[in-house]
Image: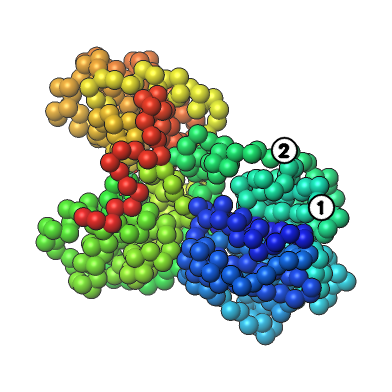
Amino acid sequence: MCGIVGYLGEKDTKEILLSGLKELEYRGYDSAGIAVLQDGNFNSYKAVGKLVNLEEKTKDFVTDKFAAGIGHTRWATHGKPTELNAHPHVGQSSYVVHNGIIENYATLKKELTSEGVKFLSQTDTEVIVHQFEKNLKKSDSAFEAFTKTVSELEGAYAILLVTKSEDKTIFFAKNGSPMLVGINEENEKYFASSDTPLIGRCSDVNYFEDGDYGFVTKNQLAIFNKKNAKVEPKFTKLSTNKLSAQKDGHRFFMEKEIYEQSTVISDTLLGRLRDSQVLFDEIESSLFDGINEIKLCACGTSYHSALSASYMFERYAKIKTSVEVASEFRYREPVMTQDTLFVVISQSGETADTLETLKMAKRNNLKTLVICNVDNSSMVRLADASILTRAGVEKGVASTKAFATQVTVFWMLSLYVAKLKNSLADAEIARQIKLLRQVPASVKVTDDRHERIKRLSKRYLHGHGFFFIGRDVFFPLALEGALKLKEISYLHAEGYPSGEMKHGPIALADPELFTIALLPQHLLYEKAKSNVEELSARDSTICVISPIVFDKADDFIQTGNHEDYMLEFFEMMVVVQLLSLEISVRLGNDVDMPRNLAKSVTVE
Ligand code: F6R
């Protein structure tokens, strides 16, 4: 989500940090900062917005001797994108940068505050530097204090810390968030949260394992594992292709983003799940006081995630829910009552139609909530409350990981409301929370799965149309599958409720009509199966996606045996995304920038 860099050596530290951050800017860019320790003195600069602002602020800052420097580009998770919330965070004589989320930050912060520590920011990260300095007072060395601090942190992190008490050292720790260190013959040490900043600067890199921590000095790289045993670095040669490194070696950003879903869903869950309770620090439960209905409003893919939410809100939270296409809603003079919570969903937070409906809701004095991927976007600023999806920057025009994180948030939110309204027993909420924890695994792409879809895609490059069909929450997924295919393959595709095909569209059925059928085993399997059989009897070409072998299909993609239909939902989501991708690739289209489309639609 965020990007971090570090450098220890004699070259121009400022230039190295800023150019490293530039390479990572695609990961997050609501603020950035650096801290450099040279000759025992710190200089630190921060700026809100894109990196050019930081470049401007540091233009007179000179780094021309040995230094230890750290830098960060931020994608806000805790606290608004302000200068105070930007990293590096400062203690009395140390600075820290961090990616990830410290789950127990509230407990640590309370303790530190009661001991007189003053916090400057709203971030979870700031506790790290204060906790370190507290430990430093009772330790024989900075490394001892750092080791103790790391052992006290829960959650996901990649951390770099510099301190005056050992001014020629950078301390690091990694757990759940990526980080690597690079070396070269000049004894320099480079850190980053992904390969790109290191390309051209060093030849050999070590990717840290979860639980690794340690320090670097000019002549040393000391790594300890989670059992506190010293380990040797495992160096590999660094690739030399920057674009490929930005795409993590994938052919397209969309492909990378499909593969990334497991990580960004984990990020979205982080700190929000307890055994039988979902927590959203960013909203007050009073938001739901007096609310008898939820109205969801969005466009495109976000509209599809809203549709899936409507099934979950009614099923789990037992609250009346309706869903609206924003461009329709804004002109149809809708009745808006004040017992309705108005929820807008948007990856960008800037989509003009959706933003306009939010303004309408505000004018009508409705309570408003936005589910959004971009903090400080227009919608986040306008709504009464916001929940961030933590998908990181989505570059592919066809949305994938944003959708995955939106559905994840909606599943959590429906359980949150179910708890408030007592509509599900604690044991059932606890069961579903266990399922939520399995979502990251259910969306992992295996080589076999990808290879199978790649092979199969060659049979779906023509025809007079596609129908993606599903029932219940798989209907919005069918809509989303069809939208993905339309957007990047330019083939005609529709999403349809399986049971509705016989009311008209079945007239189109022939071998050149391709049906992509979503057949989960845990939700209306027999009903949906009959609908597919009706199409099979009319000779439509059928590709079934299901854990249960279906012998009347022309093609079959077997999904895993999950214990709940929502896990089937997530796995099938990946299948339809990959299918669209591979069809588009075979047709020779520009996957990341399909014709006629823009990433953020800020006009009507
Ligand atoms: C589909 C897609 C669009 C967006 C829609 C809403 O892949 O990207 O349909 O989902 O334009 O955008 P946001 O979510 O930014 O409001």
Q: Residue at x 37, y 56 (%)?
A: 348
Mark 1 = which residue? 187
Q: Counting residues from the N terminus, which is met first, the one under dot 1 or under dot 2? A: 1
Query: Mark 1 belongs to which amino acid?
Result: Asn
Which-is-in-front pick, marks 1 and 2? 1
Residue 123 is situated, as x and y percent measured from the top left of the image, at 56, 70
Q: Are marks 1 and 2 in contact (CB under 8 Å)?
A: no
SS under mark 2: strand
The label number, if any, that marks residue 237 in the structure image: 2
Q: Nearer the viewer, residue 75 or 11?
A: 11
Q: Residue at x 17, y 27 (%)?
A: 505
Q: Nearer the viewer, residue 404 or 532?
A: 404
Residue 311 visible: no
Q: Residue at x 38, y 54 (%)?
A: 347
Q: Horizontally, is 375 left or right of 468 in the view?
A: right
Residue 440 is situated, as x and y percent measured from the top left of the image, at 53, 44
Q: CA distance from mark 1 to mark 2?
A: 16 Å
Q: Nearer the viewer, residue 297 or 591?
A: 591
Q: Is residue 572 above or below residue 19?
A: above
Q: Quadrant of residue 374?
A: bottom left
Residue 387 is situated, as x and y percent measured from the top left of the image, at 42, 62
Label 1 packing within 10 angstroms: few (<14), some (14-19), many (20+): some
